[in-house]
Image (cartoon, helix red, strand yellow):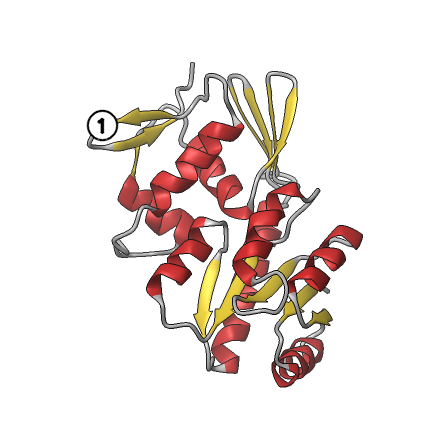
Amino acid sequence: MSTILVVDDEERIRVLLSRALSDVGHRVVGVPDGDSALTQLRAQDFDLMLLDLVLPRTNGLGVLDRLPDLHSPPPVIVLTGMHDVSARVQALNKGAVDVVGKPFVLIELLARINRHLGASDVRTGSDHRFLGTPGLRLDTNRRIVERDDRRVVLSERESALLAHLMRRAGDVCTREELLNDVWGLDFDPGSNLVEVCIGRLRSKLSPHPPIETVRGVGYCIPNV
């Protein structure tokens, strides 16, 4: 059973999702605004959060901004009726693992939820939980990387990107490969998703971040 936080200011949406998710065995907590969501996230761990962007008090993008401050932030699927592409890209840049438009088709949303929960389960398996390269150790379960006697908490997307680079240590990973394997996109969305996430990782792993740019090709972590 997974615990899912539903954040939406429309009560009918919260009720619909709570019933649908409860019917398939999940525990659901529903809140109407961003401040309440942050309170819940500080009080307990969640396996997934469904987050509307347009919320009273702290909005959805504001909630995403605060996730890196939490001990164990959950992966986030953004639900939004906004047709502004820039807002959707912002949500992905801030760490959301998926963006689903409103009105959504419930069966499709449930499939996306299962996919992300399933990916989380695979990453937490004992054989795949810990990854190591010279000077780095990543706990993919808790999304914590150890570097130079420091422990750094990563977002879901940052952890997935770093894990991919660590598994391919010594190889150059192209931008297209990262978009496909980390973001699940088989096309270039015309944005700088990869570059922004690489920049956040380098900042968190500074000084001397291990991620190298191979100009015109992609990124790699040296295996030496």
Residue 39 lies in quadrant: bottom right
Left or right: residue 28 compared with residue 158: right
Badge 1 element: loop
Confirm whether residue 2 shows in the render: no
Q: Residue lying farthest front?
A: 57
- Residue that appears at 49% across and 18% down: 207
Residue 130, placed above or below residue 24 = above
Whole-percent x and y of residue 121? 61, 53
Residue 5, placed above or below residue 183 = below
Left or right: residue 113 compared with residue 38: left
- Nearest to the observer: residue 21 or residue 149: 149
Q: Residue lying farthest left?
A: 216
Residue 154 lies in quadrant: top right
Residue 30, placed above or below residue 10 = above
Residue 167 lies in quadrant: top left
Q: Residue lying farthest top?
A: 224
Confirm whether residue 109 shows in the render: yes
Whole-percent x and y of residue 202? 45, 28
Give the total number of marks visible in the rendering. 1
Whole-percent x and y of residue 13? 61, 81
Residue carrying label 1: 215
- Nearest to the observer: residue 143 or residue 132: 143
- Residue that appears at 50% across and 22% down: 206
Residue type at mark 1? Arg
Whole-percent x and y of residue 78? 51, 64
Q: Residue lying farthest right?
A: 43
- Nearest to the observer: residue 153 or residue 141: 153
Left or right: residue 149 compared with residue 111: right
The quadrant of the picture occupied by the N terminus is: bottom right
The quadrant of the picture occupied by the C terminus is: top left
